[in-house]
């Protein structure tokens, strides 16, 4: 164990042996802290929330309003329902008071004033594309303000969207542990690393190749897959560190010759035929990015009915791996690979199947030393009376299914039963939701956070704690500039949850014309 240094103190060089040693010592505190908080929800603690999307800047730029995605973790403010929990939330830019008020008013059973007294909001006042964590590290005075907001460093931890070397450095600077994956294990969350983990876990995955380094490797893999499977119609090509499907592409084989001419044909046709999910992407740029981060090529799974479920898991500081939830993903884009949202829970026909696969992968990740939340995505094809599942990706971080589920949990205080695939409130009432990060229309541009709250309340869309149904909005800050907002539509059935979403779209479309 190490004692928390008092400023001024020497800051170890990022990535140095000294920093790694300090980080390991801090991480050792997570277990005792978790035992204390789990045994007593009224135990005092401070949670530092840094919602930095520490991802490839060029890939992140493909998502409209991506800098507002820091707001997706505002659901963590609902930790203030725990009466002795303090939350420090740090963002790149100031978050509008109307947005903060919106979340605080959702808190069940806690007076607004009491919650506010335990909340600290800090901002870098920096709208640049630099990851939030880097902005914080570049501001020593801000780091000290965060440290000053921690009442007891022995009862505090840092939580982030994903864990990289930057988050590790910030944890060391703050003198508190990071509740997240050790950055040294991040390769397990790449497309190539995911395929390795699936094989080790004995989970089916599409035929393909990983650890490809350039366009030449891609062409060879595309050729080999067609030779292995002459009837293959398409191949999926993916950047190792792409996310939300924006780094994916498809190569169609229609018109491909047989025999030795196939290799020459693929080399010639690849730059012309490849179809990207991201709008405006080019082969030249994609090829450069592939050389930078590597990637995979795998078979495109075909079928009359194809779905993309996912299972969410968590490895806690006590080394316990559990299934948190299952979802069916809502996908869009040119070939249906871009994440738009999700429905919860996943179809009961296969939720148990993907749960079992999640348990096997979770065991592999736990043995490697992984920590925190992660999700596993599948492609599922109906075959006769059943479903055939292939695991395609591990998101070794929080993701698009994390905040909707946390919102549901914080609002209803229910539990998910991984055996029957259902989520129920303490009164045994089942809950379902339809969530989206991409409710977007040019007509919505100009609507302010206050406008959105007024529209929701006036039209009966606001979440009702009595019925435990209704709509919760997020990404509210992106609405005025980008015409984009997120929703979590909670109902007592899949059909009613979808109806709340459809009603929300209809109301916003109508009100935006006024």
Image: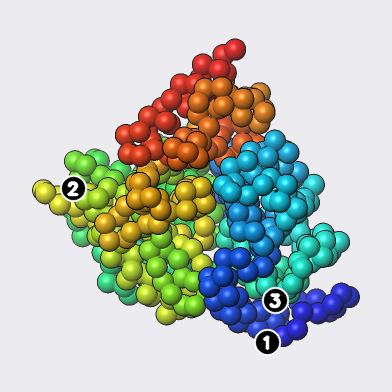
Q: Which quarter of the figure is the N terminus placed in? A: bottom right
Residue drawn at x 47%, y 38% is: 466
Depth order, front residue of 472/266? 472
Residue drawn at x 74%, y 72% is: 152
Q: Cα distance, mark 2 to mark 3?
A: 51 Å
- Which picture quadrant has residue 443? top right
As drawn, the label of residue 154 is 3
Q: Which residue is mark 2?
A: 382
**Is 114 left or right of 256, judged from the image as shown?**
right
Asked if residue 301 can be seen in this view, the reply is no
Name of the residue lying farthest toward the top = 514
**Is 396 left or right of 137, judged from the image as shown?**
left
Residue 312 on image: x %, y %:
41, 59
- Tag nearer the camera, 2 or 3: 3
Task: Provide the secondary structure element on which disc 3 rests.
Answer: helix
**Is 132 left or right of 328, judged from the image as shown?**
right
Residue 123 on image: x %, y %:
77, 50
Task: Provide the secondary structure element on which disc 2 rests.
Answer: strand
Q: Which residue is mark 1?
A: 1
**Is 52 left or right of 7, judged from the image as shown?**
left
Pointers 2 and 3 in contact (C-beta within 8 Å): no
Q: Cα distance, mark 2 to mark 1?
A: 53 Å
Depth order, front residue of 50/209? 50
Residue 396 on image: x %, y %:
48, 63
Q: Cα distance, mark 3 to mark 1?
A: 11 Å
Q: Which quarter of the figure is the C terminus placed in? A: top right
Residue drawn at x 26%, y 56% is: 420
Depth order, front residue of 469/264? 469
């Amino acid at each position: 164990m190490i004692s928390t240094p008092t400023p001024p103190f020497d800051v170890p060089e990022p990535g140095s042996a000294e920093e790694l040693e300090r980080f390991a010592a801090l991480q050792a505190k997570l277990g005792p802290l978790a035992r204390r908080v789990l045994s007593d929800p009224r135990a005092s603690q401070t949670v530092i929330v840094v919602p930095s999307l520490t991802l490839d800047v060029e890939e992140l730029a493909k998502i409209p309003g991506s800098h507002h995605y820091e707001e997706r973790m505002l659901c963590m403010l609902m930790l203030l329902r725990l009466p002795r929990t303090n939350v420090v939330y740090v963002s790149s830019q100031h978050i509008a008071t109307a947005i903060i008020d919106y979340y605080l008013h959702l808190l069940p059973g806690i007076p607004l004033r009491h919650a506010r007294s335990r909340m600290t909001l800090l901002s870098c006042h920096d709208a640049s594309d630099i990851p939030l964590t880097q902005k914080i590290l570049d501001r020593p005075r801000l780091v000290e303000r965060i440290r000053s907001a921690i009442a007891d460093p022995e009862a505090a931890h840092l939580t982030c969207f994903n864990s990289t070397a930057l988050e590790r450095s910030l944890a060391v600077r703050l003198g508190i542990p990071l509740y997240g994956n050790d950055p040294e294990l991040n390769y397990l969350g790449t497309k190539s690393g995911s395929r390795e983990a699936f094989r080790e876990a004995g989970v089916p995955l599409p035929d393909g190749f990983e650890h490809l380094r350039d366009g030449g490797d891609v062409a060879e893999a595309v050729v080999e897959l067609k030779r292995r499977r002459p009837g293959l119609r398409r191949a999926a090509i993916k950047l190792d560190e792409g996310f939300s499907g924006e780094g994916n592409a498809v190569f169609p084989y229609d018109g491909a010759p047989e025999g030795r001419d196939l290799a020459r044909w693929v080399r010639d046709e690849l730059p012309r035929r490849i179809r990207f999910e991201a709008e405006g992407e080019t082969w030249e740029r994609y090829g450069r990015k592939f050389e930078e981060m590597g990637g995979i090529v795998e078979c495109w799974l075909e079928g009359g009915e194809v779905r993309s479920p996912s299972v969410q898991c968590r490895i806690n500081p006590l080394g316990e791996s559990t299934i948190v939830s299952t979802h069916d993903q809502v996908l869009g884009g040119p070939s249906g690979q871009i994440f738009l949202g999700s429905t919860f829970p996943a179809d009961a026909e296969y939720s148990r199947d993907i749960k079992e696969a999640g348990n096997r992968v979770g065991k592999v990740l736990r043995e490697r030393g992984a920590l925190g939340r992660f999700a596993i995505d599948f492609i599922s094809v109906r075959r006769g009376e059943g479903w055939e599942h292939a695991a395609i990706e591990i998101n070794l971080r929080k993701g698009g299914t994390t905040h909707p589920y946390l919102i549901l949990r914080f609002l209803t205080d229910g539990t998910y039963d991984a055996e029957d695939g259902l989520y129920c409130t303490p009164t045994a009432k089942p809950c379902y939701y339809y969530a989206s990060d991409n409710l977007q229309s040019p007509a919505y541009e100009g609507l302010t956070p206050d406008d959105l709250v007024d529209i929701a309340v006036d039209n009966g869309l606001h979440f009702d704690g009595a019925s435990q149904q209704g709509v919760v909005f997020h990404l509210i800050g992106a609405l005025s500039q980008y015409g984009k907002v997120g929703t979590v539509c909670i109902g007592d059935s899949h059909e009613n949850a979808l109806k709340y979403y459809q009603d929300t779209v209809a109301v916003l479309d109508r009100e935006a014309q006024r």
